[in-house]
Amino acid sequence: MGAGPLVGLRVVELAGLAPAPFATTVLADLGADVVRVDRPRPGADVLTFPHDPLSRARRWIGVDTKQPAGREVVLRLVDRADVLLEGFRPGVTERLGLGPEDCLARNPGLVYGRVTGWGQDGPLAQAAGHDINYIGLAGALEPIGREGERPVPPLNLLGDFGGGGMLLALGVLAALVERASSGRGQVVDASMVDGAALLTAGMHGLRNIGLWSRGRGRNMLDGGAPFYDTYETADGRYVAVGAIEERFWQALVKVLELDPEELAGRLDPEQWGAVRERLAAVLRTRTRDEWAALAEGTDACLTPVLTPEEAAEHPHNVARGTFVTLDGHRQPAPAPRFSRTPPADPVAPHAPRADTPDVLAELGYQPEEVDRLRAEGIVA
């Protein structure tokens, strides 16, 4: 029996890459019963691999949705589902007979969540792209990087996961709240451009009051300010410094054993270079972990920059259970936390398409029907 605030929620996931699987994982981690619908035979997708956190905590079936009998399998899942999630280009599910009109005709209360890079409409709706393209168009990529250097891709965190998958999950949950009063489902159109643009709201606020008026790498939160940056230490590792407020800056100066008067120009952008050089010189005199130990218990806002492997072993993350181990493989734990309905530990990914017989039985298919569908290549 599952646990978490979404126990009882039934989700159908049409297998895809990155944002939709991430949104599905968020819902599954919180207790939703998810069935992933994949192709009946393995494809050539290099991003489908064992022990993938984006495949955990759901059942997995293989169905040829291009065949009428396969489409009917998915529509039977839709009949009893609360949510369907897909991440294909606009029009793909419509051509399969699994678009919003098809599914809402079967289940008017269905929340149909779809995520794309550009959105379901607009001049670029049918164009190919990836995270870097979407965040570039959203204005979220250009500000990231050092002064005088080219923009640096922040992995694929802003488009695929933050602006795409996470906002898709939020949109689905909002639609479910509305359904509680109206009884009606609807389509949630999550665009990674829209979502990445939304993530820059704070930056736009600073721009509107003149606090983000300089070029890339020359502002308060983009590495331009010496009190908000990373610094190399004696062992070639790094610490993160985030001493923005004056009281935190004073605590940092104390940890570094520096004279505050020597760094009096820290709020003057014209003197940021000199202040940075002084901080950098001092921070290179000790190792990363030595500085972390000296700053621990203070408000200096100085912390180690950890590798993903180190992060899982940090005492704070261990105490909070921030990471879990499934089948011997480390990965992030479900988040956020709930006081009354905590989710259970996530279930390791099932073997691809391994749940097909059980799910078909739940949908009312008799053993001889399953055998026929398998023989015809319609199900795995």
Image: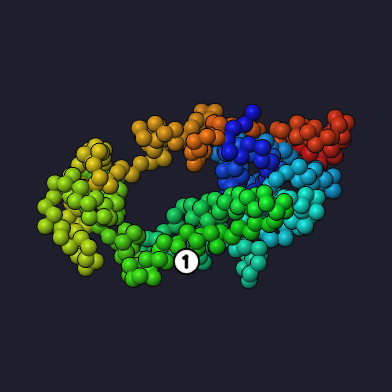
Whether residue 121 is situated above or below residue 356 in the rendered picture: below
Check the image and name the residue furthest to the front: 181
Apparent side of residue 194 relative to residue 275 in the rendered image (left or right): right
| Colouring convention used in this rendered image of the protein | rainbow
Vertical relation: 358 (above or below) 96: above
Q: Position of residue 43 (x, y in %)?
A: 68, 44
Q: Position of residue 70 (x, y in %)?
A: 81, 44
Neighbour class for label 1 at 10 Å: few (<14), some, many (≥20)? some
Q: Please name the residue shown 69% across and 41% down the image.
A: 10
Q: In which quarter of the image is residue 245?
A: bottom left
Circle 1: residue type: Gly
Question: Which percent across, then down, holds residue 353?
Answer: 70, 36
Q: Is residue 172 visible?
A: no
Name the residue nearer the viewer: 237 or 157. 157
Foreground residue, 176 or 371?
Answer: 176
**Which residue sits at x=42%, y=34%?**
320
Side of 161 where 299 appears, left or right:
left
Is residue 289 left or right of 209 when viewed as pictured? Answer: left
From the image, which quarter does the C terminus lie in?
top right
SS at mark 1?
A: loop
**Quadrant position of residue 349:** top right
Residue to which mark 1 is pinned? 139
- Compared with 86, 8 (above or below) is above
Q: What is the tally of numbered marks visible in this picture?
A: 1
Q: Quadrant of the N terminus?
A: top right
The residue lying at 54 percent from left, 28 percent from top is 327
Asked if residue 348 is positioned above or below residue 64 in the image, the reply reads: above
Residue at image location 65% in from the left, 67% down from the top: 121
For the question of whether residue 207 can be seen, the reply is yes
x, y percent for residue 323: 46, 35
